[in-house]
Amino acid sequence: MHKTDDNIVLGKLKRLAIEFDMDYDKHMFKKNFVNKQDCALLQLITGSPIPLEFNKFGITLKQRAKNIDDFLSSDMSAYYGDGLVVDIAETFGTIKNIKNQKTKKRLTLLLNSFDAYSGEAVVLGRPEKAVEKKNIAGVLYHEWIHVLVEYNKLTFRDWKYNEAFTVYLEHHLKTMDNKDIEDLKEMVKKVSHKKEYGAVTRRMDKFIKLFADKGTPEERMMALHAFKQKKDM
């Protein structure tokens, strides 16, 4: 991704922060590219719930680390993980459970190479196909929204609400003039029955309704805090 593309994404994030009365600091937005398999490995051992096939190698981080050789010898190792946010310290703790020293060293070198902010690194799978290259700016926007939400201490305890809020925020700037809101609602309906994304999209509908009548950044933030407090109880 070119520097100019980064600036476009950063501009959108700054606008988004204003829309929700969030604090913004451009220095917290960093990125790291890795090959596809390394991205898939990181998704596995950081506990990514999607794709669901990851659960075959363990539900807990410790189980997944112990079964990492099975993952590497399976078809899932070719899965294209487009992006994620990695908690550096937590992931170092997880890889201690990997028995294969070569794989452990591989991941240790990777973690040590990351450009991180406040102990977290945004990691992107290096795009190779045309469609991947086309979508990479959107992937970066999504992961940097996670960073923005975390920076403002707005992360939900339930990952499904956290992911739903992030996906909603991806669409917010386009829905400000109501040109995209109906498309967003339609997307929620179409994928809400799917096993992988249904739990997230059903919660997205709650955010659509929550912010529908909130006209100012202050109103949106107040509504969000009240909603988050209720869901995190």
Image (spheres, helix red, strand yellow):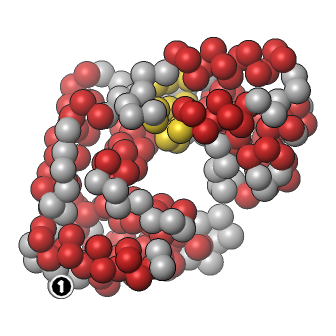
Is 211 placed above or below 36 here?
below
For the image, the number of numbered tags is 1
Q: Quadrant of residue 31?
A: top left
Q: Position of residue 124 (x, y in %)?
A: 50, 32
Is 35 left, or right, of 101 in this rendering?
left
Mark 1 falls on what kind of element?
loop
Residue 39 can be seen, yes or no: yes
**Between 207 and 136, the one nearer to me in the picture:** 207
Residue at horizontal 15 percent and vertical 61 percent from the top = 21
User: Residue 1, image x and y in percent?
Assistant: 36, 24
Q: Residues within 10 Å of mark 1 (few under 14, many from 20)?
A: few
Query: Would you say residue 185 is visible in this rendering?
Result: no
Residue type marked 1? Asp
Residue at horizontal 76%, vertical 21%?
Answer: 104
Q: Is residue 135 left or right of residue 223?
A: right
Q: Which residue bears the numbered disc 1? A: 213
Q: Residue at x 57, y 33 (%)?
A: 89
